[in-house]
Amino acid sequence: MNINSIKYSLVCAMTSVGISVHAAESIDWGEMQPEVVYRYELLAPVAGYYTPQQSGVLKSYCTGDVIGAYKDAAHKEEIFSENSFYSGSGEKVFVYPVTKGETIYFYNPAPVADGNFRFAVDKEAIKLGSVDPSPENSVLSISTSYRLEIAFNIAVKCSRCTLDINGMSVELTPEVVDSYISVNWFSILRQWYREDKIKDGDILTLTLTGIRDVYDSSNRPDFGDGLGKLVLKYTMAGRPAELIREVGTPNSGVYDFLSYYLPGSDKGLVRLIFSEDLDPACHPIAEVHYGDQDNIEAGMYLERVPVTVADKTVTVDLQGVTRFPEEMVPGLPARNSISLVVSNIKSADGQYVLTGSMASPYSFGFGYNLKSVAYSIAADWMPVAGSPLKAGDQMEIWVLNGQQIMFDSVDFSYVKDDVAQTVSVPYSSLKVEKDNEYAEAMLFYLSAPDMECDADSDITVTFGGLKCADGLDHSSDIFVRYKSASAGVDGIDEDAADHVYYDLTGRRVVNPAKGIYIRDGRKVIRH
């Protein structure tokens, strides 16, 4: 399909969707001249022609819609571009072969964007469009400038590139695409930094030679250093800070991201350790990302989490927040992947730290397997539930998965003179042991505190400030009720000493297999 049929189809489509298309007065450029700028308007047909005085290459430039080239005045036989690209100034550039005396016709029946049109023949002076990073910047940091990008106004070739600094020289291969030249200097500069061959303030010289028009090798620029030569000088920043050790990331062997981390647990801390001191005021950003980018309706979960900087270390705190899939993105089918992104980290000299990734020069990304955790929590008490309890009684509390909980105190609640009272035994006063017979179980020993209870008052014992490693509320799983010793109770309730086995959820077991059970208020293990 040539440009005529394309424009006709586009105008028809615009009309069909209700866009008003008004007839516009045609523009006849007549016989055209190189390097003259011609203006064209929206939907106004334009036409003109040019007869080359010699064979060679013609380049057309459009800032708006494309103006096509044809071999005939009826605009039926289109000339296809040998190459097309964007110039350094953003113009669309098309390259056509032309023959001396054979007229080329320019035409567009209905431009869908207005703009300027021009064309050039023979030699067009090669001009420098942009240089990134610019040598005029104060310093060159490879943390943010992994490569050099240069744009010219026309398509070029380049023969050679050299880097020179402190008596060292290396030749790199420039990558040339149309009017752009790029040089990847990251690897060699990082190596020289690591070998202490570059320091803050050193001058780097980059030299490109053999720059020329891709269609006319005799067309070479002069940027002040000789034909076809470009010399750029940079002042180097100091050695960038590099990540030398990780804690709590997949790279350090931690592949699972738990749905909850207990406050005070090192498992909930991610640490990034760098080679140089960091700027304590750089305010890094740490975010948890979860969801499905292809499921827009469900949405994404984004959480900003606490992060601190000290010396050479960035610490990310994931503690104290539940992150179950159904909570983060309700309605989204559970996914097993979740990510942590840490960004905006700077060293003490003001440079961004080195991420080693051109795609993300300012951030580190870590992908984890999301693991939802839940623990069975159960307690066995001595004295047994329902017994009388008085001050000084020795108590033993066995807790299933006790290594997965934290608490501040053991609280005794009762009634004195019809007023609710609570006495607490702090955690620091407890004797704490692991149960070697059952993994993750813990034993806590204490003496009952002084309590002046009403004769008919129950004494309820709970764990104060209880937190569990699954983030769920297990306060009802660690709970017992005693009688006041002044009530004159001679024994315990029959259902507390019935010699029947119960599982850890309190259900009666008729034929217990191997495992752990509660019998007569005590924890027993059947082998």
Image (spheres, rainbow, N blue to C red):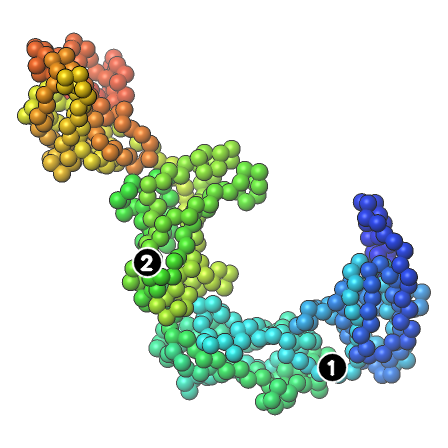
Amino acid at dot 1: Glu
Query: Label 2 to label 1, Cα distance in Å?
Result: 55 Å
**385 or 160, which is in the foreground?**
385
Question: 342 left or right of 295?
Answer: left
Numbered mark located on residue 15 in the image: none
Q: Foreground mark, 2 or 1?
A: 2
Amino acid at dot 2: Val
Label 1 CA crowd tier, 10 Å (few <14, some 14–19, many 20+) = some
Q: Is residue 133 above or below residue 290?
A: below
Q: Residue at x 15, y 35 (%)?
A: 426
Residue 395: x %, y % from top left: 11, 26
Q: Is residue 113 above or below residue 125?
A: above
- Total number of numbered discs in the rendering: 2
Residue 464: x %, y % from top left: 22, 31
Residue 139: x %, y % from top left: 45, 76
- Pointer 2 residue: 309
Q: Quadrant of residue 46?
A: bottom right
Label 2 CA crowd tier, 10 Å (few <14, some 14–19, many 20+) = many
Q: Residue at x 10, y 30 (%)?
A: 446
Q: Secondary structure at mark 1?
A: loop
Q: Residue at x 82, y 45 (%)?
A: 18
In which quadrant of the rendered image does the N terminus lie? bottom right
Q: Quadrant of residue 168?
A: bottom left
Label pair 2/1, CB-CB below 8 angstroms? no
**216 or 92, which is in the foreground?**
92
Residue 429 makes an appearance in the image: yes
Which comes sooner in the sequence, label 2 or label 1?
A: 1
Q: Residue furthest right?
A: 74
Residue 188 makes an appearance in the image: no
- Pointer 1 residue: 124
Question: 196 left or right of 80?
Answer: left
Residue 372: x %, y % from top left: 38, 36
